[in-house]
Image (cartoon, rainbow, N blue to C red):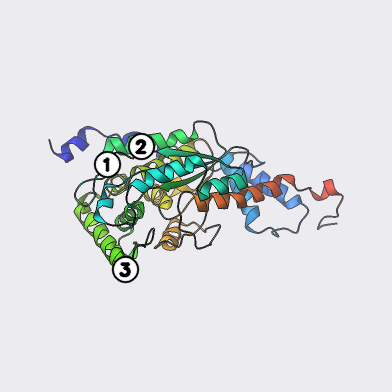
Amino acid sequence: MTETSQTAKAKPFDDIRVLLGDLPPFDEEAAAAARARDAELTKPAGSLGRLEEIAAFVAGWQGRDRPSMERPLVAVFAGNHGVAARGVSPFPPSVTAAMVANFRAGGAAVNQLCKTFNLSLKVYELALEMPTQDFVTAPAMDERTCAGTMAYGMEALAEGPDLLAVGEMGIANTTAAAAIYHALYGGQARDWVGRGTGLDDAGLERKADVVAQAVAFHRDHLDDPLEVLRRLGGREIAAMAGAIVGARVHRAPVVLDGYVACAAAAVLHALDPGSIDHCLAGHVSAEGAHREVLRRLGKAPLLDLGMRLGEASGAALACGVLRAAIACHSGMATFAEAGVAGKDA
């Protein structure tokens, strides 16, 4: 039986498509109430800049006039890639498992950031012993695996976080992300490829060639963004896409990490631009074309610090900005409470 006939008979992606067609909208009333409170706080209007916008954004997506950050979750998804065997990273796939152990032992950068900003951290290990297929010669995943991994990502919302930050770990996953961007946005492979964890010039050329070969191999199947995801992505990217959708269903705003995390968002955006309206870009990465990706997604990054670590580090750091925005909105006194003459006095 051919791959085409198998796909025609079994459509595991159907549930994902149905879910995307019925996502909760932004709560304009809650956001308006948050803006009304902001107008009464003891400061000149607009003086906190983007912090004021963030407070209203969180309020609208949480559906409450007082935004909260009582149960924030940083979710790091880890997966391995068959394409790593082509020398697209200076590190072997065994590093993925080693870093997962480091996360769990509390020794990574993201652990320190989560402690600093009082964020819960969970690490999701995605069959590291079974890398995806080498997508230069075969689809990275079959449809059932990809859809099931997206569903698994949705389970990150099971305990009801009120804010979700998504990140990843996976040797060769910047290659997968670059392939997704090349498939979705066109151009040349080199437009989307960066140095990842430190490739030299020869490695960078090899990586661009791998991405070009992969997109050419799958070119007849790339009109559907979910096909792009399963053919060129990885388990961690599929799980992040599922987590982003799950967060929307549960009315939890999302903070995106860097170049790889945004590949998951890019797939959803290609399916329906409104599906990632509840997402903020935590930062702009130093990796490759991340700034151009954010432009295409319509996301202005909260931070620009030259980071390219992954593991949700940029998103976790940006959560500190969100915590500050929410604290100011909820904790500041109004003019009436403080006995201060307002602007119309």
Please state, as top left, top right, bottom left or bottom right, where the N terminus lies in the image: top left
Residue under numbered circle 3: 201
The local crowd at label 2, few if under 14, some if 14 to 19, many if 20 or more residues have their Cα within 10 Å, is: many
Residue under numbered circle 2: 149
Residue 187 seen: no
Q: Earlier in the sequence, mark 2 or mark 1?
A: 1
Query: Foreground mark, 3 or 2?
Result: 3
Residue under numbered circle 1: 141
Q: Residues under labels 2 and 1: Cα distance?
A: 10 Å
> Is residue 309 toward the left or the right of residue 229 in the image?
right
> Is residue 181 toward the left or the right of residue 53 in the image?
left
Question: As shown in the figure, which amino acid type bears the numbered disc 1?
Answer: Met
- Dot 2 falls on a residue whose secondary structure is helix
Going 50% across and 63% down the picture, which residue do you hit?
306
Whether residue 120 is situated above or below residue 205 in the rendered picture = above
Question: As shown in the figure, which amino acid type bears the numbered disc 2?
Answer: Thr
Q: Nearer the viewer, residue 172 or 148?
A: 172
Question: As shown in the figure, which amino acid type bears the numbered disc 3?
Answer: Asp
The local crowd at label 3, few if under 14, some if 14 to 19, many if 20 or more residues have their Cα within 10 Å, is: few
Q: Nearer the viewer, residue 93 or 69?
A: 93
